[in-house]
Image: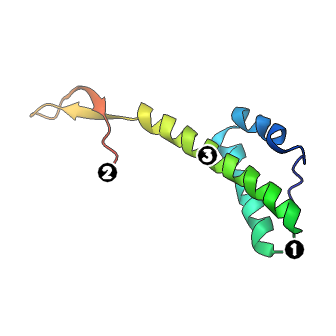
Amino acid sequence: MTEPNTTGQASNDDIAVMSFEQALKQLETIVDDLERGDVPLEKSILIYERGEALKNHCEKLLQSAEDKVEKIKLSRDGQPTGTEPLDPE
């Protein structure tokens, strides 16, 4: 089970330096813990809040990666002519 620091916001400071994979793994662990239902209420609230911070961090990292992805533009004869931002549908 996840053991968050009970000092509140300070316990989430480490999230900012996590990779996407690290944050996602920890988020999955928190979801598993909460779904099992054997976590006391106060601890559930703490790990839920940490999960929310992890989710936000993952979304921020995904948005940053999405912003870097570009689409290759092709000329009529199929030759690459440059790039343009990808339109996420």
Label ID, residue 38 = 1
* Mark 2 or mark 3: whose residue is earlier in sequence: 3
State the separation of the CA atoms marked 2 and 3. 21 Å
- Residue position marked by numbered label 2 in the rendering: 89
State the separation of the CA atoms marked 3 and 1. 25 Å
Left or right relative to 17: residue 57: left
Q: What kind of element bears circle 3?
A: helix
- Asked if the residue under mark 2 is in contact with the one under mark 1, i.e. CB atoms within 8 Å, the reply is no
Q: What kind of element bears circle 1?
A: loop
* Depth check, front residue: 39 or 7: 7
Quadrant assignment, res 76:
top left
Q: What kind of element bears circle 2?
A: loop
* Mark 3 or mark 1: whose residue is earlier in sequence: 1
Residue at the image point whose x is 72% and y is 32% from the top: 17
Left or right relative to 34: residue 84: left
Type of amino acid at the residue the image marks with label 2: Glu
Residue at the image point whose x is 28% and y is 33% from the top: 72
Q: Position of residue 84 (x, y in %)?
A: 28, 30
Label ID, residue 56 = 3
Type of amino acid at the residue the image marks with label 1: Asp
Left or right relative to 77: residue 66: right
